[in-house]
Image (tube, helix red, strand yellow):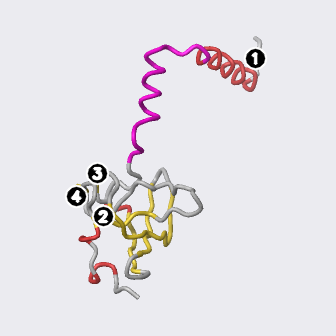
Amino acid sequence: MSRIDPWSHIVSGLHERKAINAQPDSALAVRHARERNSPMPPAMANAASIRRIEWQTTCTILVSWSDSTLGRIEDQTWRAGFARASGVCGLTGEPVRRGDPVFRPLQRGGVLPRNAFDMIRADRLSASNTGTPN
């Protein structure tokens, strides 16, 4: 009885998959193009993922949150602004319309944070549930 080397089996399987993917089906190519052009899904699905919100200044808050797929973020700076697109409030689950006052993760150095498209409605934050501003 001959044994198949597991590593060779894995590598040969990858080579076969590469050959299959080299000639994509046109419907598959259209689907991938559509997925690339669609907006990113929100990282924060609900308020349970938010662990803490703390006022940093009158227009910035620190948000600590976690997600099973994106990891855990402590004291992420979010800045007040206006919603650039419609979405969902990460704190309450309420709809957010384009132009609504919101807090969004701060973008630094041209790098989008993992949760760049998340929003918290500004009218849902109060001194009583987040602490007082500095």
* Magenta residues (range): 22-41
The x and y percentages for residue 66 are: 45, 61
Pointer 3 residue? 86
Q: Nearer the viewer, residue 66 or 117?
A: 117
- Amino acid type, mark 2: Leu
Residue 52 falls in image quadrant: bottom left
Q: Are marks 4 and 2 in contact (CB under 8 Å)?
A: no
* Alpha carbons under labels 4 and 2: distance apart: 8 Å
* Alpha carbons under labels 1 and 4: distance apart: 58 Å
* Alpha carbons under labels 3 and 2: distance apart: 15 Å
* Alpha carbons under labels 3 and 1: distance apart: 57 Å
The x and y percentages for residue 85 are: 32, 51
- Toward the top, the furthest residue is 1
Pointer 4 residue? 94
Pointer 1 residue? 3
Q: Secondary structure at mark 4?
A: loop
Q: Earlier in the sequence, mark 2 or mark 1?
A: 1
Q: Is residue 35 above or below residue 48?
A: above
Q: Residues within 10 Å of mark 3 (few under 14, many from 20)?
A: few
Q: Residues within 10 Å of mark 4 (few under 14, many from 20)?
A: some
Q: Are marks 3 and 1 in contact (CB under 8 Å)?
A: no
- Amino acid type, mark 3: Ser
Residue 121 falls in image quadrant: bottom left
Residue 27 within the segment the image draws in magenta: yes
